[in-house]
Amino acid sequence: MSRLVIVSNRVPPPRTKGAASAGGLAVALQSFVEPGTLWFGWSGRTAPETSSEPRIVEGGGVQYATIDLGTQDYARFYVGFANSSLWPLLHFRLGLMRYRREDFDGYLEVNAAFAAALRPLLREDDIVWVHDYHLMPLATALRALGFRGRIGFFLHIPFVPPSVFDALPPARGVLKALCDYDVVGFQTRTHLQDFLDCASRIGGFEVEGDDIIVAGRRVRAIADAIGIDAPGFARIAQRSTGTAYIQRVRESLIDRHLVISAERLDYSKGLPNRFEGFARLLARFPQHHRRVSMLQIAARSREEVAAYQSLRRELDRLAGDINGRFSQFDWVPLRYMTQTVARTKLAGLFRVARIGLVTPLRDGMNLVAKEFVAAQDPADPGVLILSRFAGAAEELTDALLVNPYDSDEIAEAMNTALEMSLEERQERHAALRRAVFEVTSARYCNVFVDALKG
């Protein structure tokens, strides 16, 4: 029987498998990873030179193999091309894209180093599943080392139309690298169609339906929406409401409604627009003064990138301005924190919140929206306000969908949610819950691996 090999930029250590600190990818895959699986990637550590011999540990019958990145490789591969070129490009932020040829060379070199360290661990009948934008050229590097098994790639962030993708100087080379996979997956049909259009118009490849023909090979492209373990997250949320942490939160609210937002501190998440939307709510709908508090959790990330440093300064200024304008001696309207919050605590916060505010400017899927829905009490559910530019908006149509660039539209949606009747909240939540419980993480994994097995 073929073994599944997962490759991702970061690898969850065995001790955090399924734990609160696990990232979105690890959480999505944890129910699918079984004894015998190999998970390979970067350790998260830097060293003078990129290591060639992987460090292997085992947990629960799963092997976790990692390598360290050299300091220069980290700067060019991770900080450089991956997060200063690809990330802004694929989130439609061309004004933030920074491209240097030496960074792209470093990107290719690190992918070659990944392949060289992984190749000796592979069996010829292994099925290799590669994840996300850091590793687009990995199939090319593995093929160059003689691996002929099935290799699939899944992009967890958006893809863009040809008019945007063509701004990347090595656009055709990146497309050609993606076509060295057997299956290429995307979160939504929109992202899939944008990829096919790029393959045809920029790559010059023949496209037949959802297949791409390259040098006689047929590459299959699929849309496969990622989900969560909804029943499991719902149980965590229900248990968390009785904890001392959530009791302290309830006491601090003093019967006020809670608006919750939680994600990484990233310019793609629309945080300044969201803060402005909350400020517009307080300015235009003063009946909510002292009746609502907003909690924004924005865990720091990629602090080496200048755009992220600038974003943090802007949010600090906006938070101070909002609280300065609207606070009263017994009410601070906006609470803003950049510490990481454990998933168990976050689930409890979601459950007690009246509004889940999820308004990225662009997102591949956004699992926070699905977690908020799963966490709710069906008898007295909160309301999800969701950006229509998040992939999840294609499934969660009973949320209040907004244009995240319009702070007044965000404010109006928040006002609607705060004044919404219990009956309407229950009806909307029931439809959202059905969607979240149907498109699960297990379904996502099964669909992709079945396609990869051919």
Image (tube, rainbow, N blue to C red):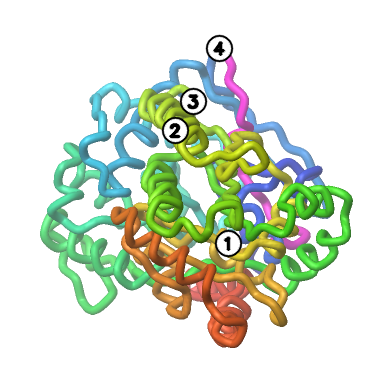
Foreground of the two, 212 or 305? 305
Q: Which amino acid type is marked by label 3?
A: Glu
Q: Which of marks 4 and 3 is nearer the N terminus?
A: 4
Q: What is the spatial separation of the Cα atoms under label 2 and label 3, in whole angstroms? A: 23 Å
Helix, strand or loop for disc 3? loop
In the rendered image of this protein, does residue 442 appear above or below residue 153? Answer: below
Residue 30 bears which disc, if any? none
Q: What is the spatial separation of the Cα atoms under label 3 and label 1, in whole angstroms? A: 40 Å
Residue 46 lies in the magenta-colored region: yes
Q: Which of marks 2 and 4 is nearer the N terminus?
A: 4
449 left or right, relative to 98: right
Q: Which of marks 3 and 1 is nearer the N terminus?
A: 1
Q: Name the residue under label 1.
A: 125
Residue at left offset 29%, top offset 53%: 405
Q: Residues within 10 Å of mark 2 (few under 14, many from 20)?
A: few
**Callout count:** 4
Q: Can residue 371 be seen in this view?
A: no
Residue 407 lies in the magenta-colored region: no
Highlighted range, magenta: 33-48
Q: Mark 4 points at which residue?
A: 48
Residue at left offset 15%, top offset 42%: 167
Q: Report the mark closest to the observer, 3 or 1.
A: 3
Foreground of the two, 48 or 353? 353
Report the residue that reaches farthest toward the top. 48
Characterize the magenta stretch by its predominant secondary structure. strand
**Labels 3 & 1 near each other (Cβ < 8 A):** no
353 left or right, relative to 142: right
Q: Which of marks 4 and 1 is nearer the N terminus?
A: 4
Residue 303 bears which disc, if any? 3
